[in-house]
Image (cartoon, grey):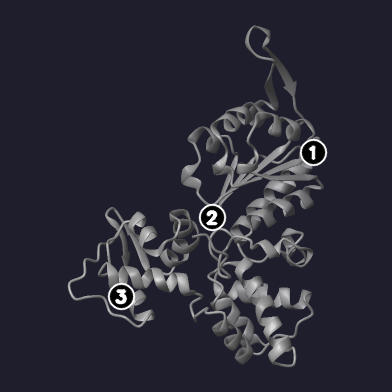
Amino acid sequence: MSRERIVSGTPLEAEEDSLHLSLRPKCLRDYIGQKQLREKLKVTLNAAKGRAEAVEHILFHGPPGLGKTTLAHIIAGESGSRIVATAGPALQRTGDLMGILTNLNERDILFIDEIHRLSPVIEEFIYPAMEDFKVDFVVDKGAFAKVINVPLKHFTLIGATTRAGLLSAPLRDRFGLYYHIDFYPPEELQEIVRRSAKLLETQIEPGAAETIALRSRGTPRIANRLLRRVRDYADVKGDGAVTKEIAERALDAEGIDSLGLDSLDRKLLRVIVEYYQGGPVGIEALGATLNEEIDTLVDMVEPYLLKIGFVQRTKRGRVASPEAARHIGLKLPDGAAQERLF
């Protein structure tokens, strides 16, 4: 059962608007967090700019909502380059990619989101484009088939994925730069919330920014989303100012608890603790019990629960921690099997 969750790191349908995009930083100077990554990118961009070359192909991987797309746009802006954005599932035929590649100019950037979902045919087609900046295009079929070698301008491919393990080794090896983006600490999320509130011309107290940050699951996209929900609540239920009390009431009303867990997170934990005695339990069994798609659980629910130690992945399945049980007001059964990763 697919659903839109306010604490999901993936964009909601209603967020593809100018308001959402206006909160994105436009340059590395305004990008908050990921300090080491920013420093590495600054060196890479300055070196490429000094040599008047295209930036090396870059792969960003990490959970959704942490800024992979934003970084791609920042790299384009810092390089003074045009960016063409697409997604792995959108590239179904070689002709789709051929049209994009042949229209790229020198040092342009091609951004492919969900790059792990490229079909094998498209993946094979893109190898010579990444390595030699040329593609072989087959015209006609059968006895009349002929191969046309098409040279390309030197461009930069930036790939983004939430499932780096699903990338084939040949594709992964063709990226010169490979960066992992991790969850943000609450202090950096507070800074992001304060910056976004300023852009939205919303008055916010430090305690409110802290409350929003602590419930944002380490994810900037969620922090900005919660800020907008809290701002709406403050406009309707208060005088427009976002106080700590207003923030807590607004997020409680949305069903988001003090750690940023929503009803689906708590339901998953409750199923593991109550129905499966704390685990281990396979992800397929959890999906069937919860009536949820496995990809939803693996991509959008589990990463944060793993991050905070509420769930562990073992060879035999998922295991809930005692802290997870306490958080939802339960206790693990005596003698529950608590396998750990070694």
Label drawn at residue 62: 2
Residue bearing the label numbered 3: 322
Residue bearing the label numbered 1: 52
Callout 2 crowding tier (Cα within 10 Å): few <14, some 14–19, many ≥20: some
Foreground tag (1 vs 3): 3
Instruction: State how far apart marks 1 and 2 are (Cα).
Output: 30 Å
Amino acid marked by disc 1:
Ala
Taking depth in this image into account, of 116 and 195 the one nearest to the observer is 116
Amino acid marked by disc 3:
Pro
Callout 3 crowding tier (Cα within 10 Å): few <14, some 14–19, many ≥20: some
- Residue 289 is drawn in which quadrant? bottom left
Residue drawn at the location 75% of the way across and 32% of the way down: 99
Instruction: State how far apart marks 2 and 3 are (Cα).
Output: 27 Å
Residue 342 visible? The answer is no
Residue drawn at the location 69% of the way across and 33% of the way down: 97
Residue 311 visible? The answer is yes
Q: Earlier in the sequence, mark 1 or mark 3?
A: 1
Label pair 1/2, CB-CB below 8 angstroms: no
Amino acid marked by disc 2:
Gly
329 relative to 124 in the view: left or right: left
Label drawn at residue 73: none
Q: Earlier in the sequence, mark 1 or mark 2?
A: 1
334 relative to 119 in the view: left or right: left
In this view, 126 is above or below 34? above
Taking depth in this image into account, of 287 and 172 the one nearest to the observer is 287
SS assignment at label 2: loop
Residue 319 in the image, given as x and y percentages of width and height: 31, 64
SS assignment at label 1: loop
